[in-house]
Amino acid sequence: MSKEQRDDALLAFAVLVREGHIGNGRQVGVQSVEKALRHVAQKFVLDRKFDPRRSNAGQRDLDLPFKRLLKSYKDADPVPRPKLAIPVSTVKRIAEGYNMSDHHSAVGDLVTIGFFFLLRVGEYTDPYRRGRSRKRTIPLRRKDIKFWKDGNLLPHNSPLHVLESADSATICLENQKNGRKGSSVHHKATTGAFCPVKALARRVFNIFWGSNSDEARLGHVYRADGTMSKVADRDINIAIRWGALADGLLARGYTLDRVSSHSLRAAGAMALKLNGCSTETIMRLGRWTSLTYMTYIHTQIGALSEGMSELMATDIVFQNVG
């Protein structure tokens, strides 16, 4: 196959990926097309052949046809609209009021846990669609949770009131989306009902008495009649939107399509930022390896620019030395 024929075939493949003929049947963004082309190129390189997107082995940029195609897709894609951070009051509303059933109460506890521990939704739920699996992320299991009181571990078979009396708790994430393994996050108990330790205690207590396995996941809900349900990522999205309505966020400039499970992680990062936590602390708690966490610190939050106009309006005399 000539270089021209190979380029034509690869460009046609890119168009099929873009239009959804290869994939889930829906048009995808430029990043998905770039990823598909990159995977094809990696296969060529692993077979000791040249990257088909480039004319020369040491060439940095893609060949012009690929650059132009990807540029046209990027220009045509809509402006990214990240999910908005929800206020702490909304998280509290879900934690306190989302209790229509045992399953809903478990969802409320998981929302609390996700907020305080800055968890990705896949780290504490099951996928909604059957047959869908996560390649890296291992959701939290009972054995990944530790409760502490006065420096001593509390066993999981303790009564609920004993677990809820713990002064701190630790979670260990065996594997994450970013490939980091064995990350631990520790939190002290807070006063009042809105507490990460108490929420974890209720989940662990339910799982321990519903299942004999320490591999049972944090999102499994065991009922008195012996049945079990699984909290899916979709359940978290529904709870977040319920909380947005219950807390009156629509009157405060929010729309339901801008809030989801991502808003929970954003809310945790935003709460830390507004309370003066350092960048290093936020990155450590959220297990971010770079400043990508800044995508969660939205410019839409007015508190971030509070007082800036007054500072800018202050007349300061300066000397131009250039």
Image: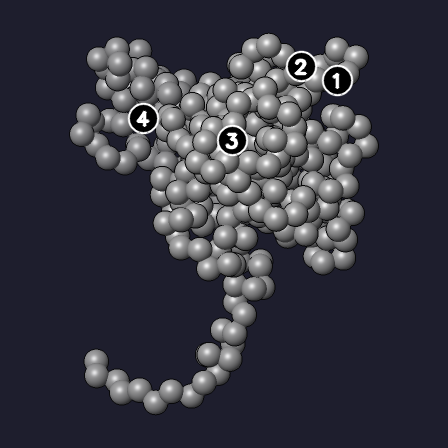
Residue shown at the point (61%, 42%) measured from the top left: 195
Q: Earlier in the sequence, mark 3 or mark 1?
A: 3
The residue sitting at the right extreme is 100
* Tag in front: 2 or 3: 3
* Tag in front: 4 or 1: 1
Q: Earlier in the sequence, mark 4 or mark 1?
A: 4
Q: Earlier in the sequence, mark 2 or mark 1?
A: 2
C-alpha separation, residue under disc 2 versus residue under disc 3: 19 Å
Q: Report whether 54 appears left or right of 169.
A: left
Q: Report whether 283 appears left or right of 202.
A: left
Residues packed near mark 2 inside 10 Å, few (<14), some (14 to 19) or many (20 plus): some
Q: Position of residue 113 (x, y in %)?
A: 58, 36
Do tag 3 and tag 4 residues touch (Cβ < 8 Å)? no
> Hey, which quadrant is residue 218 in on the image?
top right
Q: Position of residue 1 (x, y in %)?
A: 31, 11
Q: Earlier in the sequence, mark 3 or mark 4?
A: 4
Q: Earlier in the sequence, mark 2 or mark 4?
A: 4
Q: Disc number at residue 223? A: 1
Three-letter amino acid code at disc 2?
Gly
Residue annotated with mark 3: 147
- Disc 2 is placed on an element classified as helix
Q: Earlier in the sequence, mark 2 or mark 3?
A: 3
Do tag 4 and tag 1 residues touch (Cβ < 8 Å)? no
Residue annotated with mark 2: 210
Q: Quadrant of the C terminus?
A: bottom left
Residues packed near mark 4 inside 10 Å, few (<14), some (14 to 19) or many (20 plus): many
Residue annotated with mark 4: 53
Q: Disc number at residue 139? A: none
Comparing 165 with 286, the one in front is: 165
Residue shown at the point (75%, 51%) measured from the top left: 247
Q: Report whether 186 appears left or right of 227.
A: left
Residues packed near mark 1 inside 10 Å, few (<14), some (14 to 19) or many (20 plus): some
